[in-house]
Image: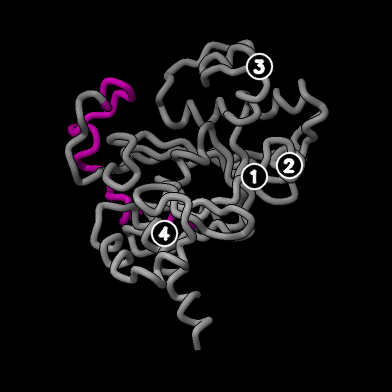
Amino acid sequence: MKLQLTRPLAFIDLETTGVNIGADRIVEIAIVKILPDGTKQVKRKLINPLMPIPKASSDVHGITDEMVKDAPSFKQVANEIKQFLDNADIGGYNSNRFDIPMLVEEFLRSGLDFSLEGRRMVDVQKVFHMMEQRTLGAAYKFYCNKTLEDAHSAEADAAATSEILEAQIERYEHIGCTVDSICKFTGEEDIVDFARRFVKVNGVELFNFGKHKGKSVVDVLRMEPQYYDWMMKGDFALHTKQKLTEILNRTLLKKM
C-alpha cells in the first residue's frame, strides 16, 4: 500500500539554536516534498540565525557560527520557503509541537503570515509513539531496517521521516494511506496557539497557564483588559500574541 496523495505533502525538519520557540532561531531547514504522482522535491538551506549558536546546540546538529556566517537570514529566504510550501500539507517528526510552531514564528518575525488554514499536519512521531514508543533513529531502524546516518542533519532527518511514513502505512493497514485517514487515526489537536498558552475546550478558548489557567480568555479580557497589554509586552511567542489579538478583536466585534 503506497501513500495516496491528492495534494503535496511536505516533510520539514529544522535545526535550531535551541528549543525555545519564542527566543531561538532556525539554523538549517530541509523540506522533502512528495507530489501526488510520487515524485519528490528537496529544498535545504543553512540559515544565519543572527545570534550566536550555543555550543550545546552545535554539539547536537554540528552547525557552528562559522558555517552560517555567510548564509542568508530566514527573512531573506522566507518568501522562497513559503512558496515551496504553497498548497502542501505538512509532515514531520514531532513537527506539531516543534518544527511547525518554530517555522510559523520565523515567518511572523519576517512579516509573513504563513497560514495553516486548510492544511493537514501529519506528525509521524504520533503514529510511532502510539504503536512503538521510540525515537527517530529507532523508528528508522524498526520500520525501514536502516541505520540513520547523519542524524540531526535536517535533510537526512526529513528524508528518513518520509520513508518511515511509507513503511508505517505498509505495516498498519488500518491507518489508511491518505493524509485524512492518518490524521483521523492519530487525532488532530484543536490548536489555538503553538506555544499552548491557550487551549480550546468545547469550542471555548481557555488560558493554559498562570493565575487564569482554566478560565475563558474572552471572560478574562472583559474583566481584566490590562492583562492583554501585559501579555503583548511580555516574552510570549508572536503566534501567541497574534491569536490573543484575534480573540480580542472578535470579542470587540461582538460588542458592535
Q: Identify which residue, 121 or 129, lies in the foreground.
A: 129
Residue for badge 3: 143
Residue 178, visible in the rendered structure: yes
Of the image marks 1 and 4, the number of the one nearer the N terminus = 4
Q: Please say whether residue 81 is visible from this viewpoint.
A: no
Taking the spot 29% from the left edge, 63% from the top edge, the residue there is 232
Crowd class of label 3 (few under 14; some 14 to 19; many from 20; radius 10 Å): some
Q: Say few, some or many: other residues with alpha carbon within 10 Å of mark 4 (under 14 / 14 to 19 / 20 or more).
A: some
Q: What quarter of the picture does the N terminus occupy?
A: top right
Q: Which of marks 4 and 2 precedes in the sequence?
A: 4
Observer-side mark, 1 or 4, equals 1
Q: Nearer the viewer, mark 4 or mark 3?
A: 3
Magenta-colored stretch includes residue 58 = yes
Tell me the CA gap for discs 1 and 4.
28 Å
Helix, strand or loop status at disc 4: helix
Label 2 to label 4: alpha-carbon separation: 31 Å
Q: Amino acid at mark 4?
A: Asn
The residue wearing badge 2 is: 184
Closer to the chain start, of discs 3 and 1, is 3
Q: Which residues are magenta?
A: 57-82
Relative vertical location of residue 105 with respect to residue 251 in this rendering, above or below: above
Specify the quadrant of the image occupied by residue 44: top left
Q: Which residue carries the number 4 mark?
A: 79
Residue at image position (19%, 40%) is 69
For disc 1, the marked residue is 188
